[in-house]
Image: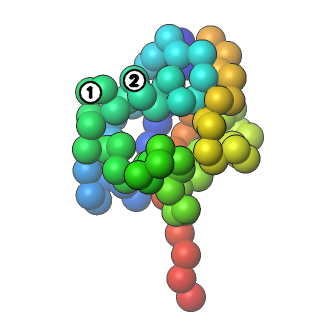
């Protein structure tokens, strides 16, 4: 089953579980995570349901480029990593 993991930066603000899901797309996998952890949604997605500007997602080591539809396909053994991008100087 695909697994969704969150990097430690988000743990400062909210519980970030590791979730196994039978989802076939990134959107469905994230929705499965948010079902059990609804507050996490606001840290990952904006009001339109798109990835926030400061969030980056990798599926099997490849960065997700479509930040709007989130319809990237997942394989049965996919590893999804949700990261909070760092900025500053």
Q: Is residue 65 left or right of residue 41?
A: right
Residue that badge 2 annotates: 32
Q: In this view, does 67 lie to the left or right of 52?
A: right
The residue positioned 49% from the left and 25% from the top of the image is 29
For label 1, the SS is helix
Q: In this view, does 73 lie to the left or right of 50?
A: right
Residue that badge 1 annotates: 36
Q: In the image as oriented, which residue stretches furthest toward the bottom?
A: 89
Q: From the image, which quarter does the C terminus lie in?
A: bottom right
The residue positioned 53% from the left and 47% from the top of the image is 50
Q: Is residue 7 visible?
A: no
Point out which mark residue 87 bears.
none
12 vs 78: above or below: below
| Residue 24 image position (x, y, % from top left) | 60, 16
For label 2, the SS is helix
73 and 61: which is toward the camera: 73
Q: Is residue 72 visible?
A: yes
| Residue 66 image position (x, y, % from top left) | 70, 44
2 and 1 marks in contact (CB < 8 Å):
yes
| Residue 81 image position (x, y, % from top left) | 55, 40
Q: In the image as oriented, which residue stretches furthest toward the front?
A: 48
* Label 1 CA crowd tier, 10 Å (few <14, some 14–19, many 20+): few
79 and 67: which is toward the camera: 67
The residue positioned 41% from the left and 52% from the top of the image is 47
The residue positioned 62% from the left and 37% from the top of the image is 69
């Amino acid at each position: 089953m695909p697994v969704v993991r969150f990097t430690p930066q988000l743990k400062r603000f909210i519980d970030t579980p590791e979730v196994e899901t039978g989802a076939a797309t990134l959107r469905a996998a994230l929705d499965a995570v948010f079902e059990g952890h609804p507050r996490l949604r606001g840290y990952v997605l904006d009001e339109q349901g798109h990835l926030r500007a400061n969030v980056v997602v990798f599926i099997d080591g490849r960065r997700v480029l479509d930040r709007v539809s989130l319809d990237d396909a997942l394989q049965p053994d996919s590893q999804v990593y949700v990261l909070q991008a760092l900025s500053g100087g």
